[in-house]
Amino acid sequence: HHSVIVRLSRPVPDPFVRPGIHHVQPLRENRAPAEAIPIPMRSGYDEIVAEIVEAVNQDSLISYTTNYQNYLTRHSSTDGYDTACAWSQDRFEGMGLEVEVQPFPMSGYTCQNVIATQTGQTYPNRYWIICGHLDSTSPNPYYDAPGADDNGSGSATVMEAARIMSGYQFEYTVKYILFGGEEQGLYGSAYYASNAASAGDSILGVVNLDMTFYGPAGNDIAWLHNNTASTGLR
């Protein structure tokens, strides 16, 4: 009948992944606001955007989410996660997108991100990113972590965006990314960001989708988180 608080080094060792043990992410470093970056935006009503929004299909979103939850667990070190990655790769390729599976080291094994690219017609080396984490967790993550909300919903939204937007041509390149290792400490996204920074990638903006469907009474609100540099994306 006592609580014990233990500070662990990353990655979290297996003995600490079990029912009754709760993990708390450390608070982020409080950095000075970044300088706002000019973001190329069109003002006023845009018929193409309206078409894309109108094409969003509830049945399609439910189908994607159901598929992701049916792996029973998408914990980053399980076959369920690897199989979900393979299915996502096949689905992206079926949309005519170029797909890269990006491996990264994590906790003594290799995890992966799935990156689908829609090359821009005018500025192919300048990127917009639509992303979410594909992995899931729970008190018993190796066997029971269907993660329909966190984050099957976000992954389904990335997939639905790709389904619709892959039928259009854009000036800038769009990357649709599903990250791994988020629940263990943002491993996949940190690896991608580090490589992108080293390569000098010109990333104009990132829309990160996390838990996009769950909205019971009193909580049916969409939270839009942004810092100073990304205010224009709102």
Image (cartoon, rainbow, N blue to C red):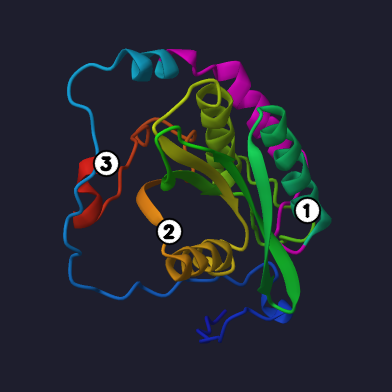
Provide the residue designation for mark 2.
201
In the displayed structure, 15 sits above or below 228; it is: below
Q: Is residue 57 magenta?
A: yes
Which secondary structure, mark 1? helix
Alpha carbons under labels 2 and 1: distance apart: 27 Å
In the rendered image, which quarter is residue 129 located in?
A: top left
Q: How crowded is mark 2: few (under 14 residues within 10 Å), some or many (20 or more)?
A: few
Q: Can residue 118 be seen in this view?
A: yes
Which secondary structure, mark 3? helix
N-terminal label among 3 and 2: 2
* Quadrant (top left/top right/bottom left/bottom right) for the N terminus: bottom right
Whole-percent x, y for residue 31 in the image = 23, 73
Q: Does the magenta stretch include residue 104?
A: no
* Quadrant (top left/top right/bottom left/bottom right) for the C terminus: top left
Provide the residue designation for mark 3.
233
Q: Give the range drawn in magenta.
A: 54-77
Provide the residue designation for mark 1.
82
Under mark 2, the amino acid is Asp
Residue at 56% x, 47% y: name it: 177
Alpha carbons under labels 3 and 2: distance apart: 19 Å
Under mark 1, the amino acid is Asp
* Count of numbered tags: 3
N-terminal label among 1 and 3: 1
Under mark 3, the amino acid is Leu
Q: Residues within 10 Å of mark 1 (few under 14, many from 20)?
A: some
N-terminal label among 2 and 1: 1
Whole-percent x, y for residue 63 in the image = 67, 25
